[in-house]
Amino acid sequence: MSRKTLLFISQFAQPGTYSRATWRRVQDGDDETRALATLLDHIGLLDHINYRGVKAHEGEPLPEDLDAIDAVILGGSFASVSDNYPWQQAISVWAKRWRGTGKPMMGICGGHQLMSTLLGGRVEKSPAGPEVGSLPVTRTQAGRAHFLFDGFDDEARFFFGNFDRVVEVPEGTTVLATRPNLPAAALDHGGGWVSVQFHPETTCDRMATCWAELDPQQGARYTFIPGCEAMMRNFITGNGLA
């Protein structure tokens, strides 16, 4: 049986707007496509799927042949969705095509916000300031029953690091989890599309390194979370990729 193909779209940052030297201190550096491959290998899934990564923020083209892809993960970004860089526009155009296939997609942080705006939601800067640290979420009734949260208890924490937030969810979207300053921390948009404001795809070290560069006190808010990456397994196995 041929392996299913998972595409990861990295929208890490607008080139030239961040310190590459900072990221040399962590495993896989600023290459999120490689970092996700490392995580998938760690949880025992990399050898069971055909994994592809595209650095869309660096101008790498998104694949034209949608039939060759079975599921998509859209990563986070230092860029705000309101920046509207050309590569963000290209992702939005491509994602509209992908939506028409009816195949699954998971958005993370900036990917969560881009997917929400694409479907008619609204994103704005959080008036309380950035949401930073290893923080719990409150699941809704729908969230407690959702496959994305399988195996997580009510006290489960996740890595947050965002300036913006989804304040109005698209029509037909179901809220799966919230936080006091985040009315839409996790969403099911229907049609196989899900998105989360937090980062189940990364490590404490990567998050702390990133935020410590901006503010050492912010970096200190991250603590190790055992099993956080299980959400990536839930998305992949829950959609029949492995």
Image (cartoon, helix red, strand yellow):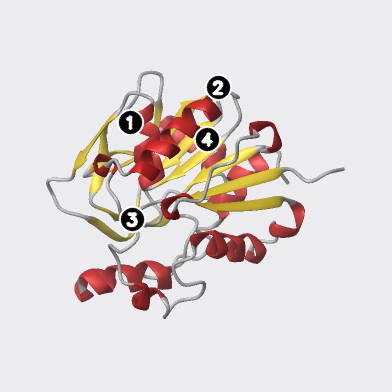
- 134 is higher (above) or lower (below) than 198: below
Q: Which residue is mark 3?
A: 14
Disc 3 secondary structure class: loop
Q: Earlier in the sequence, mark 4 or mark 2?
A: 2
The amino acid marked with disc number 3 is Gln
Q: Which residue is mark 4?
A: 146
Q: Is residue 166 left or right of residue 95?
A: left
Disc 2 secondary structure class: loop
Disc 4 secondary structure class: loop
Q: CA distance from mark 3 to mark 1?
A: 19 Å
Residue 185 spot, x, y in % from top left:
34, 42
The amino acid marked with disc number 1 is Thr
Front: mark 3 or 2 = 3
Q: Residue at the spot x=42%, y=31% of the render?
A: 141
Residue density around tag 2, few if under 14, some if 14–19, many if 20 or more, within 10 Å: few
> Which numbered tag is attached to residue 117?
1
**Are discs 4 and 2 less than 8 Å apart at CB?**
no
Q: Earlier in the sequence, mark 1 or mark 2?
A: 2
Q: Residue at the spot x=60%, y=46% of the render?
A: 7
The outermost residue toward the bottom is 25
The amino acid marked with disc number 4 is His
Q: Which residue is mark 2?
A: 100
Residue density around tag 3, few if under 14, some if 14–19, many if 20 or more, within 10 Å: some
Residue 172 spot, x, y in % from top left:
40, 19
Quarter of the image holding residue 236? Answer: top right
Front: mark 4 or 1 = 1
Q: CA distance from mark 4 to mark 1?
A: 22 Å
Quarter of the image holding residue 1? Answer: top right
Q: CA distance from mark 4 to mark 2?
A: 23 Å
Residue density around tag 1, few if under 14, some if 14–19, many if 20 or more, within 10 Å: some
